[in-house]
Image (cartoon, rainbow, N blue to C red):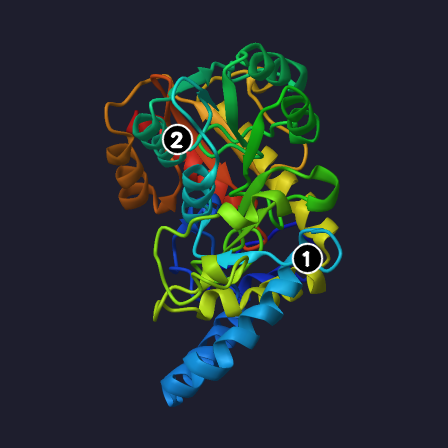
Amino acid sequence: MDTFENPLWGDDWTEIRALFDALQPGHAYLNHGGFGNPPRTVVVNQQQWRARMDANATRFFRRELAPGLATASRAVAEFLGAPAGDLVALVTNVTAATTIAVDSVPLAAGEEFLVTDHGYLTATWAAERRAREVGASVVTARIPLEADAAGIIEAVLAAVTPRTKVALIDHVTSSTARLFPIEELVPALQERGVIVIVDAAHAPGMLPIDLAALSPDYWGGNLHKWGYAPRSAAAFWAAPKWRSTLRNPIVSWGEDDGFPLRLQEIGTSDPTPRLTTPNGIAFLRALGPQRVREHNVKLAEYGQAALASALDVDPATLPGDPGVPMRVVPLPVAFDDPRDLQAEISDRLGVEVAVPKWNGRTLLRVSANIYNAPAEYDRLAAGIKSLL
């Protein structure tokens, strides 16, 4: 493993870093928000599940999978603060969760589906496809990159009309790394008769979740990011009144079994990431969720400040939200295809980072996790200007 110091964590950081020994040596992985990285203990647990599956696939799929998923579902539901005794459906990712919600929600011709311009592109595509199919329309709430919580609420509610049927709202946005005040937005939208889908792709593990208190209509969150589960693992929850109408895009053996089995029975697709989710949760709890979250946020702030200095940007003008270990810095140059710059940063600087394109602007988004160190952000800051 690479040798760094990390005073933001403490003296035992090298032991923490060693738990992520699968990371590419010599490379700085500053894109945990993209795909996540599980620690060794979680990888070993997944391998144990795979060994059981491969030893006797018939016994595994016929007799062991269902109780294993039920155990995992209970652990994840408790972790997410679901109502007492409730379960969540364990699905592959939030893309699946959002598609299930969008395709299941009641929507008719002439009605409106509300999204924001910070939403994940494929989720917006799902809303647009559903609207086309039923003759509805999609309305986009425009929110400035630097808007505060009050401004976000104002922009979203201003886009609501008497025809608004459904709203798709992020908890933490992907491209812009903004925290949306869903604790205020969800009830405000519901009071206006709007059905609310929460895209919480980044939230589990990053932020404390209390589904019982939030009470959205539909909710999906990834567990393979800050929940330390393997890829691909996510949770989907729906209010009881909507569960009988939920549609799994893939009709499989759970079709007649209701929620959550209808959504997580998908033939012979590898279920081991979802079965391993309790191990990822246990890993986070063993380290101390509060310590992990505080470290990650401080490190993301450090990375944003280093990049701002390198690019001659006033850090005070940059967005950043409490509890969010991701930060963005707008670049002075717009790229037609930011993937080219992302690849160049990887190849020439040895750094993996997200380079999203948002409203015609190219952003640099850094994530922070417990295996990262300040020196990795310094490396990016030292080289980024030469690539622009």
What's the residue at 46%, 66% (across, down)? 273
Residue 234, x across and y down, in percent: 50, 54
Secondary structure of the residue carrying numbered label 1:
loop
Residue 175, x across and y down, in percent: 44, 31
Q: Amino acid at mark 2?
A: Ala
Q: For the residues marked 1 and 2, what is the alpha-carbon distance in whole angstroms?
A: 27 Å
User: Which quadrant would residue 200 be assigned to in this image?
Assistant: top right
Q: Is residue 107 above or below residue 261?
A: above
Depth check: 35 or 73 in front?
A: 73
Q: Which residue is mark 1?
A: 86
Secondary structure of the residue carrying numbered label 2:
helix
User: Which quadrant would residue 183 be assigned to in this image?
Assistant: top right
What's the residue at 39%, 89% (across, down)? 56
The C terminus, quarter of image: top left
What's the residue at 58%, 63% (across, down)? 280
* Residue at the extreme bottom: 55
Do the residues under discs 1 and 2 have CB atoms within 8 angstroms?
Answer: no
**Relative horizontal placement of residue 77, taking residue 235 as reference (left or right):** right
Is residue 137 visible to us here?
yes
Q: Which residue is mark 2?
A: 127
Mark 1 surroundings: few (<14), some (14-19) or many (≥20) residues within 10 A: some
**Relative horizontal placement of residue 60, taking residue 206 as reference (left or right):** left
**Residue 139 numbered tag:** none
Residue 62, x across and y down, in percent: 44, 81
Is residue 233 visible to us here?
no
Q: Amino acid at mark 1?
A: Asp
Residue 255, x across and y down, in percent: 43, 61
What's the residue at 43%, 49% (across, down)? 247
Question: Which badge, 1 or 2, comes first in the chain's sequence?
Answer: 1
**Relative horizontal placement of residue 243, taking residue 140 as reference (left or right):** right
Q: Is residue 142 above or below residue 165?
A: above
